[in-house]
Image (tube, rainbow, N blue to C red):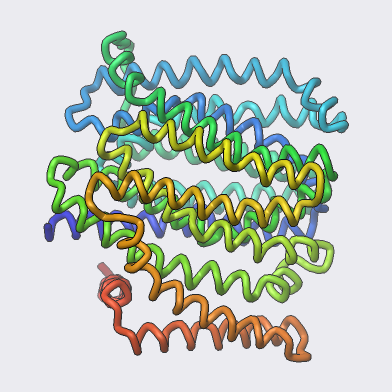
């Protein structure tokens, strides 16, 4: 158990560092770009990323998860998946290229034709990176990915900001995204050293796709449903409103999406390695949930409380609408890591069939918020998604917990104290926002008070998840101090 704990801790630490490098630096660069560009320009890129996200899911086809789960994967398996990914990406690039005029007409913006065709190159570039990332994830080697992300994020941020200062408008966002993916892929190949061979096995393809196709359909449904909010906003409202929404979503993703990514990347290969030991699997599953949700509740509820002054200070008044959307997005996104953990357990146990059925059921339920967005308002749509998020959690937890005798009731009992800590902190911080102060004074005051309350409550309650987080943090600081 100690080796598993060490492996998980090390993987989590490097995965966290990777996300800070990949998303944190991109976020800081995005703050500069948000002051130079308009919400409408962000909205145009938001429209294109709808299709890029969906097509990237098809390119992967669930193969990467199938490879990670397969304990005895051979070189022929990696080569088969590599060439499958590459051929699919080329095919989908030409599909997107041909569909760009239709996309332009649907959203009533002629700029989208060329923007979509150029951005489509990302599909092919990403296909070259999938196997390299899968190999590193299977080894729980996030140190290498951190190096790569750091180089790619800093370099692409400089490129995007330079283009924006040069007056290139929306193309600065295109340049940033393409250069980031290109650098990321190039350095993955440089550091990982894996090279493909001219091998393709139909037997390997059928075996991996037999598990992966259900995850592919699930991911397609999930990704399409996530992006359909942007379709509704872009079509029923405006590119400017879509820009406000995507910007507020990016703020919400600072903690939620990063934590979700870390949980998925680390817990899946680690838990897969002990899939046959139910007792160890349950203990590891419980531990991951408790630690993750303490961080999530404090960060997401705190972010909701400081939304308005933070937006005003960091990106200015032209993004004020985003400040009203952000708290609702935070309430919805705070459950994302919990969804990821429970769904990972279904994959670890090989229940991709149940994974698919759950995705279909949850998306049927989620039709309600979409209709609210079309016929009433974007705010009703977002609040509706908060409600359906809790319903989705019930479904995920019911089935994943059933296999290990770790029910939803037991999960809630484990995470309720963390929710209370985050909730008390958020209420006090939000109350401070009514003080008649400049946002530039209010924001640091809220951050100071929020951090003090959260830390104070954690020290008072001394919960085991807090002790574990504190131990990991102090250990990491000691290593940095010793120059290790």
Pinpoint residue 354: horizontal percent, then vertical percent.
Answer: 37, 33
Residue in front for this viewpoint, 108 or 284: 284
Q: Residue at x 59, y 19 (%)?
A: 92
Pinpoint residue 80: horizontal percent, then vertical percent.
Answer: 34, 16
Q: Residue at x 50, y 83 (%)?
A: 451
Pinpoint residue 220: horizontal percent, then vertical percent.
Answer: 53, 30
- The quadrant where residue 269 appears: top left
- The quadrant where residue 460 appears: bottom left
Q: Residue at x 60, y 34 (%)?
A: 224
Above/below status of 225 relative to 266: above
Above/below status of 38 relative to 118: below
Quadrant occupied by the N terminus: bottom left
- Looking at the image, residue 284 sits to the left or right of residue 371; the answer is left
Q: Is residue 168 visible?
A: no
Q: Is residue 472 visible?
A: yes
Quadrant occupied by the C terminus: bottom left
């Amino acid at each position: 158990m100690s080796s598993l704990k060490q492996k998980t801790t090390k993987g989590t630490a490097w995965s966290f560092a990777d996300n800070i490098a990949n998303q944190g630096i991109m976020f800081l660069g995005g703050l500069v770009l948000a002051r130079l560009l308009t919400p409408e320009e962000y909205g145009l890129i938001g429209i294109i990323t709808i299709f890029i996200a969906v097509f990237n899911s098809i390119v992967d086809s669930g193969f990467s998860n199938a490879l990670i789960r397969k304990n005895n994967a051979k070189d022929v398996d990696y080569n088969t998946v590599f060439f499958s990914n590459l051929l699919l990406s080329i095919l989908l690039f030409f599909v997107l290229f041909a569909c760009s005029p239709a996309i332009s007409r649907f959203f009533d913006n002629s700029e989208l034709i060329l923007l979509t065709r150029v951005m489509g190159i990302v599909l092919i570039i990403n296909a070259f990176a999938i196997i390299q990332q899968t190999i590193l994830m299977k080894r729980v080697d996030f140190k290498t990915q951190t190096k790569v992300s750091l180089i790619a994020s800093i370099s692409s941020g400089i490129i995007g900001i330079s283009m924006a200062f040069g007056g290139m408008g929306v193309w600065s966002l295109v340049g940033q995204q393409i250069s980031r993916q290109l650098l990321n892929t190039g350095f993955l190949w440089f550091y990982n050293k894996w090279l493909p061979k001219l091998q393709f096995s139909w037997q390997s393809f059928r075996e991996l796709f037999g598990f992966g196709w259900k995850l592919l359909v699930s991911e397609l449904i999930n990704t399409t449903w996530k992006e359909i909010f942007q379709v509704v906003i872009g079509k029923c409202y405006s590119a400017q409103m879509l820009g406000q929404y995507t910007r507020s979503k990016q703020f919400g993703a600072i903690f939620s999406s990063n934590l979700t990514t870390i949980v998925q990347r680390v817990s899946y290969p680690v838990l897969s390695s002990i899939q046959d030991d139910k007792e160890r699997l349950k203990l590891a599953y419980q531990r991951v949930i408790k630690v993750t949700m303490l961080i999530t509740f404090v960060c997401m509820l705190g972010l909701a409380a400081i939304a308005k002054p933070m937006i005003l200070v960091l990106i200015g008044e032209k993004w004020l609408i985003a400040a009203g959307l952000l708290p609702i997005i935070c309430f919805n996104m705070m459950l994302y890591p919990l969804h990821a953990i429970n769904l990972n357990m279904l994959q670890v146990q090989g229940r991709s069939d149940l994974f698919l059925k759950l995705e279909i059921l949850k998306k049927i339920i989620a039709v309600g918020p979409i209709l609210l967005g079309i016929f009433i308002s974007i705010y009703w749509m977002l609040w509706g998604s908060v409600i359906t998020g809790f319903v989705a959690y019930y479904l995920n937890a019911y089935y994943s917990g059933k296999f290990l005798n770790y029910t939803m009731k037991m999960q809630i009992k484990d995470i309720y104290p963390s929710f209370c800590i985050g909730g008390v902190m958020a209420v006090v911080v939000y109350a401070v926002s009514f003080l008649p102060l400049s946002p530039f004074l209010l924001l640091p005051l809220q951050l100071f008070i929020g951090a003090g309350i959260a830390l104070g409550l954690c020290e008072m309650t001394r919960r085991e998840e807090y002790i574990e987080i504190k131990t990991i943090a102090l250990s990491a600081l000691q290593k940095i101090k010793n120059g290790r």
